[in-house]
Amino acid sequence: MSNWIGRTFTSDTGWEHLATLVDIGNRMAGSEGERAAAAATRDALAAVGARDAHLDEFEIQGWERGDSAVRADGATYAEAHECIALPRSPAAEVSGALVDLGYGLPADFEEADCDGKVVVARSDVPDHYDRYLHRREKYYHAVEAGAAAFVYRNHVEGCLPPTGSVGTDESPVGDIPAVGVSAETGAQLVRRHEGDELTVSVTAETPDATSQNVHAELGPETDDVVYVTSHVDAHDISTGAMDNGAGTAMVVELARILAELESDLETRVRFVAFGAEEVGLVGSAHEADRVDLDDVTAVVNADGVAQGRDLALYTHGFDALEDAVETVADRFEHPVETVPKLGPHSDHWPFTQWGVPGYHAYGKSEGSGRGWGHTHADTLDKLEVRDLREQAILLGALTVHVAAEAVEIPHKEPEEIAAALEDEDLAEGMKITGDWPYDEA
């Protein structure tokens, strides 16, 4: 059995697929690039021995980038390294006085007069703050406060405006125009124009569109199933190497490993590379809605793997998932970090929000926030094949372990997940972004 480890240490399967995805370029949800990436992933899964590799198509709200700019006192910030529209921003041109809200914490919105203003908020949170604030939470605080426009200011230096979608399930296109600006442009805007009139303009098309999930399977024909997942789409401004080409490359590499270990699998394993993650977890929500969640033993979701040397996994409060990671880490005498908190921002979540045990696997990296992610700098040169291979060994062994009949991983009741979200101060943000799925008492 140990021979598979040596073969993984020398395997180029995942890395070559990562290069394929990166070279496609724009993989925005609903685009030709996303379709090409999905088809290539289907073919790669079939080539490594997974069965029934196919695409499952579904409708989405399309969004196609036009131009965007911030204008102030005769200066125009419109170059790609200065200003980019956030996906699903409405097409509009509005003006208002600039209000700098710093980190854009909830209290900052409560204390400021944002009505009719252009609100600027950073992409990070201060060290003393006890949780990460998602971009969409800051955006919808701005909407609720009556802002005319939202400017998302990167905290990472390097002339890198951040991207990331707005919108909700009910209203996929956002309420007010939104743009991302680089750390340097943001600093200049605040220094030179705070309190002055700014104009924010966005042009975009919002056609009907389709996306697709990529499916394949290995293992016995059991009703119970372990999901091994990623997302194949990426933002249109970058090649999406880390987010999430590496995750989809990992799914292909894991399929190669598990095809070799198929006789050891005691539960069916379903590989799914979801579409349209970056615009609201649309592909994974589509899949979670069409299957019996009671049959899903666990979800092993790879999003951001290999962006750091060491593997880390959110375990979402499931003790059995923690135990499984500890078992595998001890077996390989390899550091693996677990985070027991809830993380409602990747493709495990449409399953885990209803009590399905879910991992979010990622590479532990330095710094705060997304780092190079969601910027032009999310490129292949930032990754190492060694890290992809090592993490594939750990995740392959972990998947076989959680698929074992003797390993019990109890589901939780949705009420338990909702209570934990309240306890971890995540509920407020989910409610304002329209992501709270639980009925109010």
Image (cartoon, helix red, strand yellow):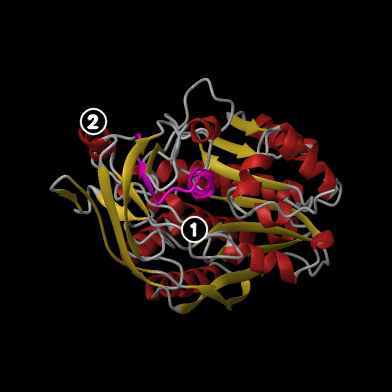
Say above or below: 7 vs 284: above
User: Where is residue 281 drawn, in percent x and y?
Assistant: 58, 59
Point out the frontmost of discs 2 and 1. 2
Q: CA distance from mark 2 to mark 1?
A: 32 Å
Q: Secondary structure at mark 1?
A: loop
- Indicate whether residue 404 is drawn in magenta: no
Residue 149: in magenta span: yes
> Is 233 placed left or right of 100 in the picture?
right
Mark 2 secondary-structure assignment? helix
Report whether residue 384 is seen.
yes
Q: Residue at x 54, y 37 (%)?
A: 311
Give the labeled residue for mark 1: 278
Q: Closest to the observer: 248 or 210?
A: 210
For the question of whether residue 407 can be seen, the reply is: no
Q: Residue at x 51, y 50 (%)?
A: 7
Look at label 1 and name its amino acid.
Answer: Glu
- When the figure is inspected, residue 116 is found, relative to residue 184, above or below; the finding is below
Dot 2 amino acid type: Arg
Label 2 crowd (10 A; few <14 / some 14-19 / many >=20):
few
Quarter-of-image position of residue 307: top left
| Relative to 42, 396 lies left or right | right
Whole-percent x and y of residue 141? 53, 44
Q: Is residue 61 left or right of residue 64?
A: right
Q: Quadrant of residue 28?
A: bottom left
Mark 2 vs mark 1: which is more N-terminal?
2
Tag count: 2
Image coordinates for residue 434, horizontal then vertical, percent: 63, 54
Q: Which residues are magenta?
A: 136-155
On the image, numbered disc 2 is attached to which residue? 191
Q: Residue furthest top?
A: 128
Task: Pinpoint residue 95: horizontal percent, then vertical percent.
Answer: 30, 52
Front one among 364 and 124: 124
